[in-house]
Image (spheres, rainbow, N blue to C red):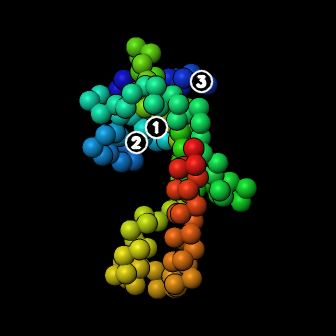
Amino acid sequence: MPSYTYQNKRGKILLGHEIGKGGEAVVYEIQNASEVAKIYHPNKLPPADKLSIMAANPPDDPTLALNHVSIAWMTDLILDSKGKICGYVMPKITGGIPIHKLYNPKDRRTNFHNFTWQYLHRTARNLASAVAAIHAK
């Protein structure tokens, strides 16, 4: 496996298990950390200056004061063995439910019997506040 380091802290990144994979990147657990690493496929890497600007300007997380992370924003950039940005580190979110399981009526009825309209409204409000915080930056 290739070697990766943090841009601004700690040193070498030890990747763990793959969590997910998509068209632009692979997300891995980071060993002994409460963070995950998003490593872009070489042909899908956004411009380094875009990632640097995003890392330097995180949005204000609207639920952080409640000890709850609602925006898994990058906390550091990841460098490959040549020192080039190839991804980023973000908080590891555990215990969450994929949102499509909540907004899809069939899934909601099947898996979440007690999920009322009030909870659905709260979920929409929380999502809207997170998106608004991102757009504000």
Residue behind mark 3: 8
Left or right: 119 in relation to 51: right
- The residue shown at (27%, 43%) is 23
Q: Which amino acid, mark 2?
A: Val
Kindly state the secondary structure of the residue where label 2 is placed. Answer: strand
Up-down relation of residue 114 to residue 129 (above or below): below
Is the C-beta separation of discs 3 and 1 under 8 Å?
A: no
Image location (x, y in percent) of residue 24:
31, 40
Which comes before the other along the chain, label 3 or label 1? 3
CA gap, disc 2 and disc 3: 20 Å
Left or right: 67 in relation to 40: right
Snapshot quadrant of residue 87: top left
Q: Nearer the viewer, mark 3 or mark 1?
A: 3
- The residue shown at (56%, 69%) is 125
CA gap, disc 2 and disc 1: 5 Å
Image location (x, y in percent) of residue 8:
59, 24
Residue behind mark 1: 37
Is the C-beta separation of discs 2 and 1 under 8 Å?
A: yes
Residue behind mark 2: 27
Furthest-front residue in this view: 136
Q: Which amino acid, mark 1?
A: Ala
Give neighbour class at mark 1: few <14, some 14-19, many 20+ (Cα, 10 Å): many
Image location (x, y in percent) of residue 130:
56, 57
Q: Which amino acid, mark 3?
A: Asn
Which comes before the other along the chain, label 2 or label 3? 3
Snapshot quadrant of residue 67: bottom right
Quadrant where the C terminus is found in the figure: top right
Q: How many discs mark residues in the rendered view?
A: 3
